[in-house]
Image (tube, rainbow, N blue to C red):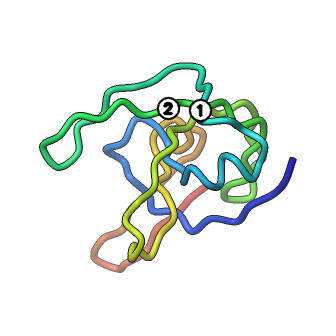
Amino acid sequence: KGNQILHMGIDTGATYTIIPVETAILIGCNPITPIRRIEIIMGGSTEYLPVINVPKVKVFGANLEKIEVICHNLPPKSPIHGLLGLNILHHFNIFFKFKSHILEIS
């Protein structure tokens, strides 16, 4: 239904991508009736978060379709809106050059 631009962090330890609940609603997805819920352990507590299917995602110049994402709001003061997890990152070759502070994505 709509487009949203999000500032995302790269999380190579996350299986799934996480987007804010509000974003899911704005693009026409309903986190109230997810395709399933997934158990996530955060800060020592367990939460069951909704997984939705996003019809189209544009990331690193590529268009991906039918991507499952978790709906969850990061802390309000966070500089990012969500996290790119392995379900999106596996579509790319990513090289971290830590000593030179370079991230290469192809």
Residue plotted at (45% across, 62% down):
9
Q: Is residue 78 above or below residue 44?
A: below
Q: Is residue 4 above or below residue 19?
A: below
Residue plotted at (62% across, 55% down):
22
Q: Is residue 6 above or below residue 79?
A: above
Label drawn at residue 60: none
- Going by the image, does 46 lie left or right of 11? left
Residue plotted at (62% across, 65% down):
6
The residue type indicated by label 1 comes to: Ile
Between the residue at mark 1 and the residue at mark 2, the CA separation in whole angstroms equals 8 Å
Label drawn at residue 50: 2
The outermost residue toward the right is 1
Secondary structure, mark 1, is loop
Kindly indicate whether the residue at mark 2 contacts the one at mark 1 (C-beta within 8 angstroms). yes
Residue plotted at (42% across, 71% down):
76
Mark sitting earlier along the chain (1/2) = 1
Q: Residues within 10 Å of mark 1 (few under 14, many from 20)?
A: few
Nearest the camera: 63 or 69? 69
Secondary structure, mark 2, is strand
Identify the residue position indicated by label 1 in the image. Answer: 32
Q: Residues within 10 Å of mark 2 (few under 14, many from 20)?
A: many
What is the x, y in percent for residue 103? 46, 68
Quadrant holding the C terminus: bottom right
What is the x, y in percent for residue 93? 53, 48
The residue type indicated by label 2 comes to: Pro
